[in-house]
Each structure stands twice: as structure tokens, then as C-alpha cells.
């Protein structure tokens, strides 16, 4: 559904150009969870913004459903953006309930009430918050709000669910709850998920495939289990000791 080929992106910093990404190629197989892990400054957020089609690369190609997004007219680019459900953090509307927040993208798309209710009901079940449907965000815990944000990103049946640091600033239990939701989205909805994180534990817990970013480059990538069984692999060195 989405392919990322040879992406490069630089920014102009105080002391000259800063290379954020260099020649990054990434395969996100349909129906799997791919984790991109790397330290702060390795280019993860830049990659997430490019994949979300919020920014353009300096070079390289992002294809959505086979189409080179750089060549799309504005209308088709908007359609391509709708194929990517971006999990954003901290921006639930305070005056809308959990259900109302999840339903908002459907209202904006003109989906009728019965269909909206059915879809929102399924997603509330998926995130384990059916009993909190009528609650306002400020009466939910941070972990519950984060799950609502994932449901909102899923509501339009995106081809790709993209989460940049979805467990950021959550305590362990709340973070585990968010990862369970991503896992259920893959298992029960057949979602394709791309998770970008600085926490190797996140990748260990849910990823099928992993790419390690270092200094804007993919240092290593492939199937998580194959990589951790390969003793020469850098992924194995960094992730294996804590695999349970
Ligand atoms: P990460 O998410 O892994 O911390 P980022 O993608 O945020 O990494 O940043 C990668 C590099 O690109 C860093 O050196 C960062 O300072 C630089 N960078 C990212 N975005 C910008 C920007 N908008 N302007 C200037 N430099 C940026």
C-alpha cells in the first residue's frame, strides 16, 4: 500500500545543512506492524512526517497504492493523505465525548449517523472503552485518551496506521494498553501499522518487522525474529538481551 524508496531530507540549521534522512528505503508489508527504532535525532519524526505526506522529501519516492505522491495533483494528494491514519497526541476536542471525537472524521466525510454509530461502537470495543463512550477527554486517563486517539486515526479505514512515539510520556501500564490496541488493530482489523519510537521495548512487544535508524540511515532492517536470531546483527545486539 505504501512504499518508501531512497528518501533524503535535509534542513538548514544554525551551522549549515543538517541531514535528517539519507537514502532511506522502507518496506511496510500489508497486514503487519513495522517498527522504526532509533535514538533521538536519528530522523524518526522526519520520516513520520514524510510518510504522512505532511512534508516532501528532497529526493526519493513515496508511493501510495502504487502512485508516486510527488506527481499527484492536489485533489489526489488529499485522497492519498486520507489513506494514512496518523495518530496524533494531545489534540482530542475537549467539548466532545470519546465517541464524538472518534466520530468526527466520519462527520466531516459526510458518513450518515447509523453508519457512524456502528463504526464508532466497533472501535470503542477494540480500544476497550465501550463504557467510557460518553466521557469527556478531561475525565479520561492519559492512557485512555491515547487509545481514543488511535481509534480516531482508524475510523476512516486507512490503508496505513502511522504512530510517531505512541507511548510517549505514558506510564508503563498505559503504554502497554496503547500497544495492545495497535496489536488488536492489526489482528482484528487487518490494519497495516508503522510505529516510530525511541523505545526498543515497543518494537520488541509488537513489531513483526523492524528498521533501525541511526544518523538518518537505515542501519539494519528485516523480520524481528530473524534478526534477533542472527548473532551478527546489530538489532540482535541492541534488542535481544531484553527479549523475553
Ligand atoms: P528524531 O525524531 O529521531 O529525534 P528528527 O527527525 O526529529 O529525529 O530529527 C533528525 C535531525 O533533523 C535532527 O538533527 C534535527 O535537529 C533535524 N531536524 C528535524 N526537523 C527539523 C526542522 N524542521 N528544522 C531543522 N532541523 C530539523
Image (tube, rainbow, N blue to C red):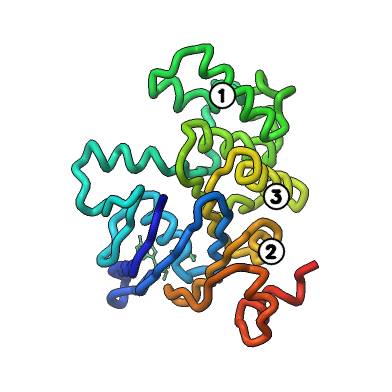
- Quarter location, residue 237: bottom right
Q: Which residue is mark 3?
A: 175
Alpha carbon separation for disc pair 1 and 3? 24 Å
First in sequence: mark 1 or mark 3? 1
Residue 41 lies, in percent from the top left, at 48, 70
Mark 2 to mark 3: distance in Å? Answer: 13 Å
Question: Which element is circle 1 on?
Answer: helix
Q: Is residue 210 left or right of residue 238?
A: left
Number of residues whose C-alpha sits closer than 10 Å to that of mark 2, classed few (under 14), some (14–19) or many (20 or more): some
Give the quadrant of ligand 1.
bottom left
Of label 1 and label 2, which has the lower sequence position? 1
* Residue 172 drawn at (x, y percent): 75, 53
| Residue 33 seen from this side | yes
Task: Select label 2 or label 3 by which is in front.
Answer: 2
123 above or below 217? above
The reply to whether callout 1 and callout 2 are in contact (CB within 8 Å) is no
Q: Which mark is residue 119?
A: 1
The quarter in which the C terminus is drawn is bottom right
Report how far apart the C-alphas of labels 1 and 2 lie in the structure.
Answer: 30 Å
Which residue is the site of mark 2? 204
Amino acid at each position: 500500500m505504501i512504499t518508501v524508496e531512497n528518501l533524503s531530507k535535509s534542513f538548514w540549521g544554525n551551522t549549515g545543512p543538517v541531514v535528517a534522512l539519507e537514502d532511506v528505503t522502507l518496506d511496510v508489508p500489508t497486514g503487519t506492524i513495522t517498527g522504526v527504532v532509533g535514538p533521538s535525532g536519528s530522523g524518526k519524526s522526519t520520516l513520520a512526517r514524510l510518510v504522512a505526506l505532511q512534508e516532501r522529501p528532497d529526493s526519493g519516492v513515496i508511493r501510495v497504492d502504487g502512485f508516486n505522491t510527488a506527481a499527484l495533483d492536489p485533489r489526489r494528494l488529499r485522497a492519498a493523505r486520507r489513506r494514512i491514519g496518523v495518530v496524533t497526541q494531545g489534540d482530542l476536542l475537549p467539548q466532545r465525548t470519546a465517541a464524538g471525537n472518534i466520530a468526527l472524521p466520519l462527520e466531516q466525510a459526510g458518513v450518515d449517523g447509523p453508519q457512524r454509530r456502528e463504526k464508532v461502537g466497533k472501535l470503542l470495543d477494540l480500544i476497550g472503552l465501550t463504557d467510557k463512550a460518553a466521557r469527556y477527554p478531561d475525565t479520561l486517563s492519559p492512557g485512555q485518551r491515547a487509545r481514543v486517539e488511535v481509534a480516531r486515526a482508524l475510523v476512516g479505514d486507512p490503508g496505513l496506521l502511522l504512530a510517531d512515539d505512541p507511548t510517549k510520556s505514558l506510564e508503563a501500564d498505559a503504554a502497554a494498553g496503547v500497544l495492545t490496541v495497535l496489536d488488536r488493530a492489526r489482528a482484528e482489523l487487518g490494519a497495516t501499522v508503522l510505529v516510530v519510537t525511541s523505545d526498543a521495548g515497543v518494537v520488541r512487544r509488537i513489531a513483526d518487522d523492524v528498521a533501525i535508524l541511526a544518523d538518518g540511515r537505515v542501519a539494519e532492517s528485516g523480520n524481528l525474529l530473524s534478526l534477533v536470531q542472527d548473532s551478527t546483527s546489530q538489532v540482535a545486539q541492541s534488542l535481544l538481551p531484553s527479549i523475553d
